[in-house]
Image (tube, grey):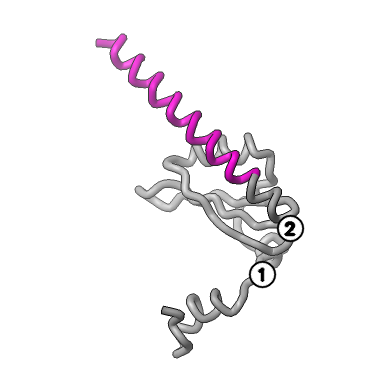
């Protein structure tokens, strides 16, 4: 019985490692496309953990990892700077355009829905 559990644990660890490697590759591609990148990890509940990425050019995006540990492993493998919170100079790097304004703020203040 204990041997079966060890095999299952080993399989889960291998899956988590492969997922972290795939996420690290995506983070690296984002960083390359945006002149570098910084990130922030945030637990989003049952759905997993969000990795917010902000490029040096102001571009931004996010990825979702199944667990906080996988997200942390991915950013470590990618070698990006990780911030504790999305604030200050880090948050100020984000550049938003008309789409973001109308989708996030415009809907609430009567702007077009872009939909």
Q: Is 83 placed left or right of 63 in the picture?
A: right
Give the residue drawn at x 63%, y 36%: 76
The answer to whether residue 9 is magenta is yes
Above/below status of 73 relative to 30: above
Residue 97 x/y as whole percent: 61, 75
| Disc 1 packing (10 Å; few <14; some 14–19; many ≥20) | few
Secondary structure character of the magenta stretch overall: helix
Determine if residue 13 is in view. Answer: yes
Identity of the residue furthest to the bottom in this view: 110
Label 2, label 1: how far apart the Cα atoms are: 10 Å
Residue 59, image quadrant: bottom right
Residue 100 drawn above or below residue 35: below
Q: Position of residue 84 (x, y in %)?
A: 61, 51
What residue did someone put label 2 on? 56
Badge 2 or badge 1: first in the primary sequence: 2
**Which stretch is magenta?**
1-28
Q: Residue at x 61, y 60 (%)?
A: 60
Residue 58 location in percent, x, y? 69, 64
Tell me, yes or no, if residue 88 can be seen here. no
Q: Which mark is residue 95?
A: 1
Element type where label 1 sits in the image? loop
Q: Quadrant of the C terminus?
A: bottom left
Q: Residue furthest left?
A: 1
Q: Specify the quadrant that holds the N terminus.
A: top left
Q: Secondary structure at mark 2?
A: loop
């Amino acid at each position: 019985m204990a041997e079966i559990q060890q095999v299952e644990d080993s399989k889960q660890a291998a899956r988590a490692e492969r997922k972290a490697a795939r996420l690290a590759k995506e983070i690296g591609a984002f960083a390359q496309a945006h002149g570098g990148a910084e990130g922030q990890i945030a637990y989003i509940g049952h759905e997993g953990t969000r990795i917010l990425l902000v490029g040096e050019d102001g571009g931004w995006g996010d990825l979702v990892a199944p667990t906080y540990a996988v997200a942390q492993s991915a950013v470590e493998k990618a070698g990006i700077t990780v911030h504790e919170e999305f604030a200050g100079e880090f948050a100020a790097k984000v550049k938003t355009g008309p789409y973001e304004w109308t989708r996030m703020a415009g809907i609430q203040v009567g702007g077009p829905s872009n939909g």
